[in-house]
Structures are given as C-alpha cells and as structure tokens.
Amino acid sequence: MDDRYGQSGHRNRDGVAMFAALLAVAVTGSAPGAAYAARPTPGLGMNLYALTSSSTEIPFVDVFKMSSPWIIRHDDDPRYKGVPKLTADGWIAALDPHEYGLAQIFNGGDGHYPAGIYTVRYEGRGTLDFHWRGTELVSQKPGEIQIKVTPVTGGGDGIAIKELSTDPADPLRNIRVILPGYEAGPSTPLFYPPFLKALAPFRVLRMMAWNRTNRTDVVEWRDRRLPTYATQASELGNAQQSTTGVAYEYQIDLANALGADPWVNVPVKASDDFIQQMAQLFHQRLHADLHPHIEFSNEVWNTHFSDGTYAQNQGMAAGLAADRTAAGTIWYVRRASRMFDIWNQVYGADAAKIVHILAGVEMWPRLDDPLLSTEGVFHKTDALAVGGYFAPAEINAKTYAQFIDAAPDQILPLLREDVTVRVKGWLAQHQAAARKYGVSLVVYEGGPGLETSTAPREIRDPITAAFVAVNRDPRLAGLYRDFLDAFFQQGGTLFVHFNDVFAPSVFGNFGALEYQDQDPETAPKYRMLRDYVQAHAADFKR
C-alpha cells in the first residue's frame, strides 16, 4: 500500500502474478535454518502516513515542514504557473516582476488543524502575506509575524503563505510556522506532542510512506532529502519534491524520541553506496538499544507500482530468467540479500540488532517457499512479511453495487467471514512456511481494507459513505481484536497497522485516527489497538 494516490496492493490479484512463475523456476538453497535469530518479539506497530500538505497527520510543531512545494503565480494571470527558482535548500531564490510564490499548509484537511495564534519566523529580506480564509494578521515586525488561524472547511481551508518579494542577495529563508502554544525559538520541540502520544503505544514504526518508497527515483545518497530542506512534504507533479521522503534524520529522531524500532524501506534504485551511507547514519544516530528493521523497497511484486516494473526490467537485463516475473523476483531477492550484507558489514559486532525482512504476498502463501529458498536467502532473513487486511471477499467493479447504502449490520458479517477464512487459511499457511525456514512471520501492513477507489464513479459516493460508517462502528474494533488474537495465537510476532492518521475517503479508511487531534475515545480502531497493547504488556515487552 502507498498513500492515497496509489493503487491498493493488498487485494490485487494482477500484481501477485509476479511471483507465480517462480514456482516453475529452479532455485538454489540449502537446508532451512536462518543464520540470524528471528528478532521480532510479539507486538504491534504502526505505519506512518505519507506527509503532504493535505495530511491530517501533524508530525511537526513547525508546520512549514509539511507545506506544499512553492508554486509561482502571476498577479495578472490566474492561470499562470511558473517554475520556481529555488536555493539548494528549497527556498525561493528570486522572483520575476509580478510573480509571487505560494505555499499551503493543511489544505484539504477539512478544518482539522489547530486554531489559535501561529508564530511565523524567518530570515532574509522580503515580504510575506497571509490573506486567506480563516487567517488574520495579528502583529508583524522584521523576522516575525503572528497570525490568528480559525479552521474552516471546504475550499480555501488551511494556511496559505504568499511570498510577494524576496531579495536575491538575501532571500527569505528558514521560514517556520509554529503551532499555537509553542515557543518559536531554540527550545521549540521538533515533534507535535499529540503526534508522539498517539504513536507511543507502538513498538515499531514503519516509515514506508514517509520514505515515499513506491515513488522514489533516488539513486545516490547526495540526492536524498536533507533535514535542512524547506519542507519535508512530498507532492505529486513536482519533480523536486515527489521523489524523496522525510529526511532519515527525522525518522531516526522520531524513533529515538519514542523508543520505538524504525522499519525503513531502502529505495529500489539505491546504489550500494547509498545503502552503505544509510546504514552508517542509522548506526551512528539511532539509540543503541533500538533495532532497525530493514526491507528492500515495498511490494516489489505489485506492478501497479513502478518498482515492480523496474525489478522485472533489471532481472531481464541481467538474464536471470526467461520469464519477466521470475526474473524480477530473483533480482529482488538478490538486491535484498545485498542490502542485508551491506548493513551487516556497517553494523559489524552490532549486526544482531538488525531485523532483516523479506516480503511475500498476502494472498499467495504457496509462494513463500520458493521465495525464501531462492539462492538461500532465508539464511540472511529474520522475518517473512506479508499483508494482513480483511474486507468483504471479491470486491471489484462488478460486485461493488451490493454495498450501495449498505448498513454496518450488512457489511460486518462479511468482514467476520473474511477474518475467519484468512486466519484459518492464508495466515496459517504463511506461518507454516516461516517455521519451516526458521524465520518470524510479521504483517507489514494490515487492518480493515475498505476502499472504493476502483468502484464505478456513478456509485462511488454512497458506497464510500457505507464503508466510512463501518469503520466508525465500535463493533469493528471487536472484530479486529479477534483477528489479532488469532494472528498471535498462531505464532505471528509483529502486526503493523496501516496507518496512523488518514482522513476517510474513496482511497480507504485506513487511519487508526481520522485526524491528529481526534479524541481516541471516538476512534474505535485506535482505541482497540492502544488497549490491546496495554492488555498484552507482559507479552509485548520491547
């Protein structure tokens, strides 16, 4: 799964064909028995949502870190969209006559962002303007502006920052927009406390979407996002900000702040040097008592993502197999194995802290065996990771109509049936393969999987409303709890929910919380996950 712009992978039967041909391909390996102990201990984890200007997840106290990329507009032409001239750190270096820069925060958040007095700090010389719905100028002096923000819904919500002018010799830069109630200065906390509190129960934080794993084209370490860059958010359609994710330094700082293990996804095109320097950064910066979980890319079997096609192309170019799908899978295994080796070399005597993860396909447990045995990769692997979603079976364009205006009482039994089938079938088979090869079974992302992005447009809205109602129904939490019970009782070790904060839409209802400041008592899934950790505290020791 990616962010809301991506295709769903957990029920994609076209994508899983990537592994099917492997069944007919001769693979090499030796007797089961992993070289590394299966590191993951029982626990719950959380996927973070992709950071964009419209996210309802609010990670940072300085919310300019989640602003949209600069757009260049023209005073006299509302259709004008120029290419911004940016400094190396993403600030506007110069503006042509009649141009202005526009950046937005909380746009599309439907009013779910903090109200109050925001403090804007900046360096350089130029003019900033904040005229927007729900925004009122309070005070202004060189280097500091205060604005009063009243959340509004619909078009024009959020905070819009206009850069009307900038001095090319001393351009406006280091713009910070500090949330109400927090001091704008050296003592300003990095992370928004409610964000930290919401994540505190979870032992592992999977950073796949924060890394923009399914969209990144980064190859060399020098091309990664730095913590000094103007914004950490990513937006589609902007070459400078669509191919990199949140800086690894911030990901490590978050893990350190929470005492949680970070699960990071190495970009599919990453060079060996990139992988080595990434491992060095984590070894140096991550607290010594934490365990980095490393995975090569994400859902490389899923050809709805460019990584799947890239893997196939690379495998065919290397002549790894005559079949594209088999060639892509063997290439994936080799790159994952190489990644394991590089991280182990960097960590040296600390290599036992690393959790080495290989990803299978949720719906195809019979492919675990050929995957793990390919070139003996299981010897280097600690955990087999699969998806763990439940949804009414066979949702597709032909069957969506049955859910038009359906009540929760009609949908919940279908979810219950899917849970029962999955627990007794797919997950049990995955667990058997994991035991055979001496690795742990983990769920890299999972939970209720109700979405309507592929539904016929003319019936999408009423079905979406029905699915939203189910996800807000307290009974869903009990069903989800039963699913987790069965997973752990079968020997599963780590279940990572997808995802932390996500506003319901046609792209799904995946968020444990719908918006960052939601009262957890009004969020059945989040409340259940939090309470589940507390109830199993003895088993879920870090």
Image (cartoon, rainbow, N blue to C red):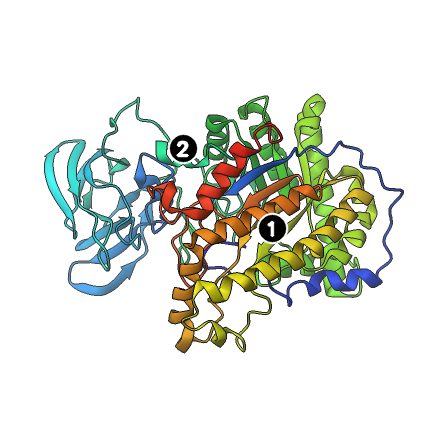
Which quarter of the image is occupied by the C terminus? top right
Tell me the kind of residue under disc 2: Lys
Residue 339 x/y as whole percent: 68, 40
Q: Is residue 459 above or below residue 178?
A: below
What's the mark number on residue 354? none
Q: Which residue is mark 2?
A: 197
Q: Which residue is mark 1?
A: 298
Q: Is residue 250 above or below residue 336?
A: above
Q: Residue at x 59, y 22 (%)?
A: 289
Tell me the kind of residue under disc 1: Asn
Which quarter of the image is occupied by the N terminus? bottom right
Residue 297 x/y as whole percent: 61, 48
Q: Is residue 136 left or right of residue 417?
A: left
Q: Residue at x 54, y 50 (%)?
A: 480
| Secondary structure under the numbered disc 2 in the rendered image | helix
Q: Name the residue at the right extreme.
A: 31
Q: Is residue 201 visible?
A: yes
Q: Is residue 240 left or right of residue 298?
A: left
Q: Is residue 419 left or right of residue 376?
A: left
Q: Is residue 10 visible?
A: no
Mark nearer the viewer, 1 or 2: 2
Q: Residue at x 80, y 37 (%)?
A: 34
Q: Nearer the viewer, residue 133 or 248?
A: 133
Q: Nearer the viewer, residue 499 or 283?
A: 499
- How much space separates mark 1 and mark 2, taking CA atoms? 27 Å
Residue 440 x/y as whole percent: 72, 40
Residue 463 x/y as whole percent: 42, 69
State the count of labels. Answer: 2
